[in-house]
Image (cartoon, rainbow, N blue to C red):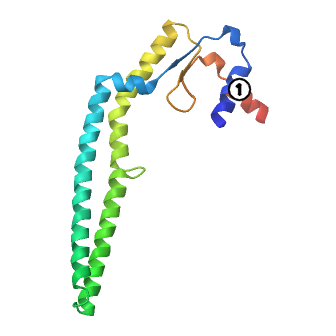
Amino acid sequence: MKKILLLILAFSSVSFAQLKIGYVDSEAIMSQLPEAQDAQKKLDAIIKEWQEELNKMEKDWKTKYEDYEKRKLILSEQKRVEIEKELVQLEEQISKFRQEKFGVRGELFQKKEELDKPILNRIFNAIEEVAKENDFDFIFDKSGDIMFLYAKEEYDVTNLVLEKLK
């Protein structure tokens, strides 16, 4: 909603007949760029490695749990508590590993950001060059949310909106 409001505000001060607007499909661009494909292969290899490690940890936990379930009736109270504590610690390690690797700000997110940054910079530079060479006023990305990838400075109404809000 906020993006649509900004879009309306941006166009409210100009005549549509004079605007030259273009769009790109950033997903299509990324899927066709060799360096983006290479980056995705690197990420896939990392994901596979971490997933295998996670699967091994989960398998180990399951094996220990199944062994515990089979023997818990013949174990002493102290040994049962000890094994249960160990199982809980293993669960916590698995959860911590999953969060560190695959969590919102985990290593996978950071690695993807690191690999994508130079590619995205190259794409944005190319978009800006195309926009200037072809005299576009705005270029949007149609792949996701409404997003400006390029806009001529003369259409920035931020200060006008701020003045209105004062």
Q: Is residue 81 above or below residue 2?
A: below
Mark 1, residue position: 9
Q: Residue at x 38, y 22 (%)?
A: 122
Q: Is 40 situated above or below 139?
A: below
Q: In percent of the image, x 26 and y 84: which residue is there?
A: 82
Badge 1 marks a residue whose secondary structure is: helix
> In this view of the protein, which residue sits in the foreground, 117 or 79?
79
Give the residue at the far bottom of this rendering: 76
Instruction: Give the residue drawn at x 77%, y 35%.
Output: 165
* Total numbered badges shown on the rendered structure: 1
Q: Position of residue 29 (x, y in %)?
A: 40, 22
The image quarter in which residue 93 lies: bottom left
Q: Which quadrant of the view contains residue 35?
A: top left
In the displayed structure image, the side of residue 60 where residue 36 appears, left or right:
right
Q: Position of residue 76 (x, y in %)?
A: 23, 92
Q: Quadrant of the C terminus?
A: top right
Left or right of 14 in this view: 43: left
Quadrant for the N terminus, please: top right
Percent position of residue 143, x then y? 49, 28
- Does 130 appear above or below 91? above
Q: Based on the displayed image, in which of its 4 quarters is residue 57 positioned?
A: bottom left
Which residue is most to the front?
70
Residue type pointed to by label 1: Leu
Q: Residues within 10 Å of mark 1 (few under 14, many from 20)?
A: some
Q: Position of residue 42 (x, y in %)?
A: 25, 37
| Residue at 43% in and 19% down | 125
